[in-house]
């Protein structure tokens, strides 16, 4: 099983996988891009051309194809976004992998309130296959890669698995990876010329909140540039026409957009609703959070504000 398999289903996960340095001798290094996001096939094609860190890059567009590939390609190590899958549990029982790791992709990794209270047949299947009640607690899991391991240990003081750190801190790695991601996605070009501007960005949730837009419009006079970045799940962008504000329509990562604008010495204010995209930039921009109070989000945001420069 001299094979390591890395699975991502969105660009942010791909970014995080590139920040994991796992040495395993001569093992084949395979990246699987699970096409569950906008323009996934085009992203895959760009990665094939630009990223030479992998021995093989595979595209799948369904869970069935992903699981089929994993079944017929036994691995020494699998890196995936989540361990709460009885299929992974079955694959472990069938010796389809030796070690299984998950990695964080947002503040959800640090939440203590996401407990699976499944009943009946699902609970029985989960128990048989080793799926835990909480993300990161499955019996077949080897360990986790996290950006804030100390906070995680504080949230889960009796956590029984190893916790590893990524190669580089999140923002530092963002700056390092910026040249690559500027080539992987369209849409960044129009922001390259902004330098030394006061810029406001509105990040909508998957359900549009008019009050969030209203907050942005009220503050608009104090900015040089104002625009809206709709959530990827919002398909009908015509609903924004009434606000007469520029829309970032491209499938670009907000984290890299913020990195680019900050790199060019712009002053940023981001209006959002508990956005994971903003959480790492607490000390680098003005965060105007208009989401419903969420303790889990605030715990991570406050920790970053106090401990990460």
Image (spheres, helix red, strand yellow):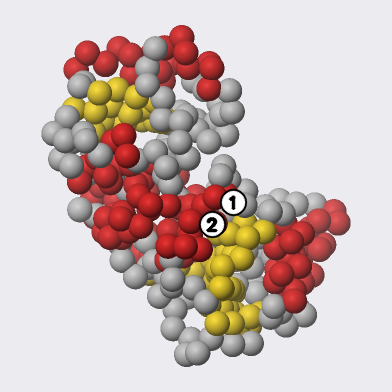
Mark 1 and mark 2 in contact? Answer it, CB < 8 Å.
yes
Check the image and report above or below for 81 versus 128.
above
Q: Which residue is mark 1?
A: 41
Helix, strand, or loop for circle 2? helix
Q: From the viewer's perspective, is 175 left or right of 231?
A: left
Q: CA distance from mark 1 to mark 2?
A: 6 Å
Q: Residue at x 52, y 52 (%)?
A: 43
Check the image and report above or below for 167 versus 9.
below
Check the image and report above or below for 129 versus 243.
below
Answer yes or no: is residue 152 visible: no
Q: Residue at x 47, y 13 (%)?
A: 241
Check the image and report above or below for 111 versus 232.
below
User: Which of 111/215 is in front?
Assistant: 215
Residue 45 marker = 2
- Residue 291: name its quadrant: top left
- Residue 293: name its quadrant: top left
The percent position of residue 2, horizontal first and vertical second, equals 59, 87
Q: Quadrant of the N terminus?
A: bottom right
User: Which of 252/83 is in front?
Assistant: 252
């Amino acid at each position: 099983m001299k094979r390591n398999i890395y699975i991502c289903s969105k660009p942010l996960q791909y970014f995080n996988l590139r920040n994991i340095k796992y040495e395993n001798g001569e093992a084949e290094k395979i990246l699987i891009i699970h096409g569950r996001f906008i323009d996934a096939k085009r992203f895959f094609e760009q990665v094939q051309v630009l990223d030479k860190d992998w021995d093989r890059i595979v595209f799948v567009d369904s869970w069935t194809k992903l699981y089929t590939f994993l079944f017929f390609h036994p691995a020494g190590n699998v890196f995936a976004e989540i361990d709460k899958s009885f299929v992974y549990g079955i694959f472990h029982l069938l010796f389809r992998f030796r070690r299984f790791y998950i990695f964080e992709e947002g503040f959800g990794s640090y939440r203590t309130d996401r407990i699976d209270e499944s009943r009946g047949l699902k609970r029985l299947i989960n128990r048989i296959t080793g799926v835990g009640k909480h993300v990161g607690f499955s019996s077949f899991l080897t360990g986790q890669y996290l950006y804030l391991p100390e906070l995680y240990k504080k949230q889960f003081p009796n956590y029984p698995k190893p916790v590893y750190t990524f190669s580089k801190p999140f923002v530092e790695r963002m700056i390092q990876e910026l040249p690559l991601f500027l080539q992987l996605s369209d849409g960044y070009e129009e922001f390259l010329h902004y330098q030394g501007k006061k810029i406001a960005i509105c990040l909508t949730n998957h359900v549009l909140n008019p009050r969030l837009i209203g907050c942005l419009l009220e503050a608009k006079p104090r900015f040089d540039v104002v625009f809206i970045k709709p959530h990827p799940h919002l398909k009908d962008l015509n609903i924004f026409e009434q606000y007469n504000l520029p829309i970032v329509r491209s499938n670009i990562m907000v984290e890299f957009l913020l990195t680019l604008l900050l790199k060019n010495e712009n002053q940023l204010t981001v209006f959002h609703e508990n956005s994971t995209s903003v959480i790492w930039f607490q000390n680098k921009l003005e965060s105007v959070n208009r989401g419903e109070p969420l303790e889990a989000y605030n715990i991570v945001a406050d920790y970053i504000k106090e401990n990460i420069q």
